[in-house]
Amino acid sequence: MAREQAERSQPAVRAAALMHIARVLTRSDQAAAEQLLEQGIALAKEVDGDATSLLLRNAISLAAAVSAKHALPLYAQYRRIDPFGGSVVSLVNAMAQHGHIDDAITYLRGPLPGDRFPLHFVNHLERECHDDETRRKLLELAIREWRNPAPREEGPEEQFAGSSFTGLFLRCWNLLPREVATPVLRELIDWALDMKSEPCEYILTENPEDPKLVSEQEFELFKLIPALQQLEPDLARSVLESRPQLAEAVKRFPLGMRSVWDGQSKYDPARDDLVEIGDSKLMPIAEALATDFEAAFRHAHESFANDTDVEYPNGGYKECWPSAREFRHIIFKAGQHEGLAAAKHLDRIPDGDLRLFAQIELCAAIAGLPQLGGLSTQRRSKRRMLSPAELDELFGAAVPGIRCPKCKWTPRTKNIWTCKCGHHWNTFDTRGLCPGCGYQWELTQCLQCGATSPHPEWYTHKR
């Protein structure tokens, strides 16, 4: 049905819809999916105006979800290089999330000029590795990048990359021969011991009786101690003897972060999943289902009224309207929990094109695909500025001492981010540590400009 409607739509809508449908079609017919993707790309190149580049930039992740051979030519032409590797992260993440982790690793072995192995993103990629051989290959690439003498763009990213690498190493070091793992471990221990970090309380669990760590240095050593005790026991004893709080934490959690994670409650989608309402409110999925997603639809309809305002309409193409994103999100969540019965909600979407995009997203949810983000556009000739009181009411008070490294936007208390496990929260409440699954986020995307930066870079003062 979606395919038939797409064929009757305007060229920009049709091009985008065909590429979204191709992503879903990979679950049943890879050859047909690639053929449909090629049609969508060809049609996007014929669209008039600046919509072509936006359509094709958005298409990189869609193409990566289908096949690397279609994604890489688009990526080479339309990628945007930034110091933190945001473009390469989007590319390889889409590949990995859709079952193409081998293609992602192959690209990272020999990336295009300007791209580097995203060491700060390596733990996300490891989550998509489904066998030890693939994990070993990823770890070997990470070691190569860790030892890469070429300087990074900014100092803080260097340290952030190291913290990410320790996370991967603690989980996968035993996949390497002892004679290979030991020198890498020594390098990481030296890096941690040389780290200059101000005192900062690191809380490992919500239990107030559990030990705490007193600095970032101790936290990094805590992650490495289990491997150190097996590979270099004498050095492990020396490190612990001089750091009593670290020794107490290791005594309580003998396997380091593995012991911490084992003690946490596991994420249950039926219990813990949340639905986003705009950019500032979350609703438990049980409440959303019980109320037929009423609050979420109400906000999406308000967003649609804003996009179609007679005086100040959104001039961007429809796939990237904020209201399109909201309707897609609602229908995707409904599809995850209600299956095909979620189709009943489609009639609540007032625009046929937005209904089409949501319908495809419903198919993606039923097929078990991950929710896919994309660019949002607000192109208006004029825009009314919200008053400070309106901003506080909608998004909460500004969070002091935090701002986007790229555009200097300051987040607010009600702004929310989403973990891959499905948990929603304000990432700055926990310094990027997901309360749902315990995952330490290494990158944070700006909700204002869309740029991605290492999480520590957001803090105007070290903590």
Image (cartoon, grey):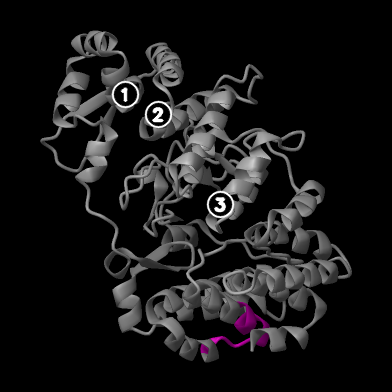
State left or right for residue 269 relative to residue 391. Answer: left
Question: Which residue is the site of mark 1?
Answer: 227
Q: Secondary structure at mark 2?
A: helix
Above or below, comparing residue 441 to residue 186 in the picture: below
Q: Quadrant of residue 224?
A: top left
Foreground: disc 3 or disc 2: 2
Give 80 or 253, whichever is nearer the viewer: 253
Kindly report the distance in space between the C-alpha atoms of the residues bearing marks 1 and 2: 8 Å
State left or right for residue 26 relative to residue 169. Answer: right
Q: Secondary structure at mark 1?
A: helix
> Could you tell me the amino acid type at mark 2?
Trp
Above or below, comparing residue 355 to residue 81 in the picture: below
Question: Which residue is the site of mark 2?
Answer: 173
Residue at left 35%, top 20%?
A: 217
Q: Quadrant of the C terminus?
A: top left
Range of magenta residues: 348-357
